[in-house]
Image (cartoon, helix red, strand yellow):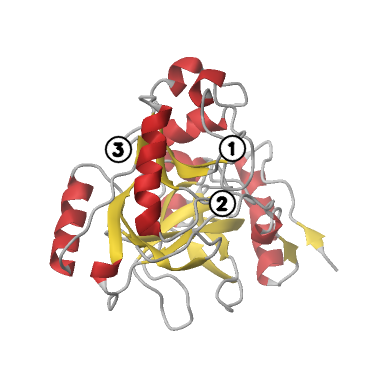
């Protein structure tokens, strides 16, 4: 028997947590069907996806660039799409004159402006003034063919032909050793950047996640779906104590649930992310069972298709 989760909102705070306590009991009993399973997301464009950087790679095989904290944007030759395949309502002038070839990039509002970028991209009717602050940072040409090292000059040439100040090619460069890589990471983060990307020069553009594309940050982060709210105790009585969240199944491992209890503001504890919401958390490695260590809430994933 499948039991649907009760509504997340109620007229009073006590009512909210009575409902959420029942939801927790159902979840722990294995009877709760999440409102929106991770596997239910619509299929998006065929994107190349990154794995996490790890020791032992041959750095000379890779190009390095800054990891931009924005919204993944895919130009399919006619329209601009999110990672999940949703059409982005960009102003007509923003994409005017773009070529009939796919471009993979990041819709970016600048360092530390992730929320601004997401807010702009999510609007159903484009805000012309907000889009004036956006940039489409192109980092690959999915249909170009050939290894990444050869796609770089083709990408730079295409962006030059577009000749629009809001369309930029992401700078790619080489580093001599891992010490230089870590030094650059530190400098980038101090300047407000999110981290670095490493792209294997010999790689073809393939819609899969492997070591051809790696991300390097000062901390690890990931996403999980909110299953229920766990009421707080002590100083958090009457507020959120923790979120019970579920990580998606991946790499042959089953979906797993764990409690996310730190990183929330007082306002978020009074009005926690809704059941079914996708949230981003940071952590420090995994324990033997695969559960994140020292997991801490970062933010609601405003666009779950990112």
Q: In screen coordinates, is 188 left or right of 258? A: left
CA neighbours of label 2 inside 10 A, class few (<14), some (14 to 19), many (20+): many
Sequence-first tag of 3 and 1: 1
CA neighbours of label 3 inside 10 A, class few (<14), some (14 to 19), many (20+): some
Query: Residue placed farthest to the top in the image?
Result: 129
Q: Is residue 258 above or below residue 303?
A: below
Q: Is residue 258 visible?
A: yes
Sequence-first tag of 2 and 3: 3
Q: Secondary structure at mark 1?
A: loop
Report which residue position mark 2 lands on: 278
Residue appearing at x 28%, y 78% in the figure: 56
CA neighbours of label 1 inside 10 A, class few (<14), some (14 to 19), many (20+): few
Does the CB distance between marks 3 and 1 fall below 8 Å?
no
Q: Secondary structure at mark 2?
A: strand
Report which residue position mark 3 lands on: 111
**Total numbered badges shown on the rendered structure:** 3
Between circles 3 and 1, the one closer to the viewer is 1
**Marks 2 and 1, how far apart at CA:** 30 Å
Q: In screen coordinates, is 60 left or right of 4? A: left
Q: Secondary structure at mark 3?
A: loop
Report which residue position mark 1 lands on: 77
Please state, as top left, top right, bottom left or bottom right, where the N terminus lies in the image. Answer: bottom right
Q: Quadrant of residue 89?
A: top right
In this view of the protein, which residue sits in the foreground, 259 or 47?
Answer: 47
Q: Is residue 108 visible?
A: no
In this view of the protein, which residue sits in the foreground, 31 or 126?
Answer: 126
x, y percentage for residue 200?
36, 64
């Amino acid at each position: 028997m499948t039991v649907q989760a009760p509504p997340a909102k109620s007229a009073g705070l006590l009512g909210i947590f009575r409902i959420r306590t029942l939801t927790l009991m159902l979840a722990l009993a294995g009877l709760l069907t999440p409102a929106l399973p991770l596997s239910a997301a619509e299929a998006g464009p065929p994107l190349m996806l990154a794995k996490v950087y790890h020791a032992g790679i041959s750095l000379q095989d890779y190009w390095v660039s800054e990891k931009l904290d924005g919204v993944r944007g895919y130009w399919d030759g006619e329209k601009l799409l999110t990672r999940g395949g949703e059409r982005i309502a960009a102003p007509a002038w923003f994409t005017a004159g773009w070529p009939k070839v796919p471009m993979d990039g990041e819709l970016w509002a600048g360092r530390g402006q992730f929320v601004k970028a997401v807010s702009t991209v999510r609007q159903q009717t484009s805000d012309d003034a907000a889009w004036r602050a956006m940039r489409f940072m192109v980092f690959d040409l999915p249909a170009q063919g050939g290894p990444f090292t050869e796609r770089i000059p083709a990408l730079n040439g295409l962006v030059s032909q577009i000749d629009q100040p809001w369309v930029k090619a992401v700078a790619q460069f080489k580093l001599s050793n891992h010490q230089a890589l870590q030094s650059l990471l530190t400098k980038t983060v101090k300047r407000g950047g999110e981290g670095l990307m490493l792209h294997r020069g010999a790689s073809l553009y393939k819609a899969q996640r492997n070591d051809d594309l790696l991300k390097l940050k000062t901390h690890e982060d990931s996403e999980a779906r909110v299953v229920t709210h766990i009421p707080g105790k002590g100083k958090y009585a009457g507020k959120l104590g923790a979120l019970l969240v579920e990580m998606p199944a991946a790499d042959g491992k089953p979906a797993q649930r764990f409690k996310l209890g730190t990183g929330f503001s007082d306002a978020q504890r009074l009005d926690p992310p809704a059941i079914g919401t996708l949230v981003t958390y940071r952590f420090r490695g995994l324990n033997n069972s695969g559960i994140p260590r020292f997991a801490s809430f970062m933010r609601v994933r405003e666009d779950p298709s990112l």
